[in-house]
Image: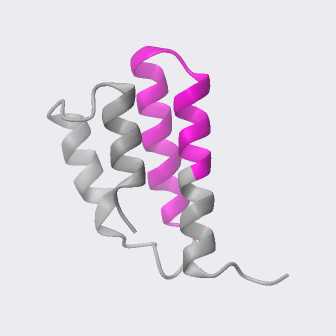
Amino acid sequence: MTEMTRAEHLAWCKQRAHDELEHGNGTEAIGNAWASMASDLTKHPETETHAAIGLGMVMVMVGKLSTKPEMAKFIDGFN
């Protein structure tokens, strides 16, 4: 099995997070998108300590990622 490049893995993480966000309802969708993104980032050696993991957790906890548009912007806003 060929390992994905960092860019491929990041695109996969983002797509899965967007899928969770789009197919869920309300705050559950936001939480699921966040959990998917954070979990998936840890599955590649070049993203396993990505700054977005900690930053996103703090932003969710203080209510800065409380709407679907805010979460979508966060998902798309880093590389």
Looking at the figure, which quarter contains the C terminus? bottom left
In which quarter of the view is residue 5 placed?
A: bottom right
State the residue at coordinates (53%, 53%).
14
As drawn, 24 above or below 61? above
As drawn, 69 above or below 14? above
Q: Does the magenta-highlighted stretch encompass residue 31?
A: yes
Is 56 on the left-hand or right-hand side of 31? left
Q: Does the magenta-highlighted stretch encompass residue 38?
A: yes
As drawn, 14 above or below 26? below
State the residue at coordinates (56%, 57%).
13
Residue 58, position as x, y percentages in the image = 19, 46
In which quarter of the view is residue 59 placed?
A: top left
Is 10 on the left-hand or right-hand side of 49? right
Single out the residue that lies furthest toward the left.
Answer: 62
**Number of numbered discs:** 0
Residue 41, position as x, y percentages in the image = 49, 63
Residue 68, position as x, y percentages in the image = 39, 27
Q: Main secondary structure of the magenta part?
A: helix
State the residue at coordinates (30%, 35%).
70
State the residue at coordinates (51%, 54%).
39
Residue 25, position as x, y percentages in the image = 51, 15
Q: Which residues are magenta?
A: 15-43
What sort of colour scheme is used for the picture? Answer: one colour
Single out the residue that lies furthest toward the right.
Answer: 1
Is 70 on the left-hand or right-hand side of 79? left
Looking at the figure, which quarter contains the N terminus? bottom right
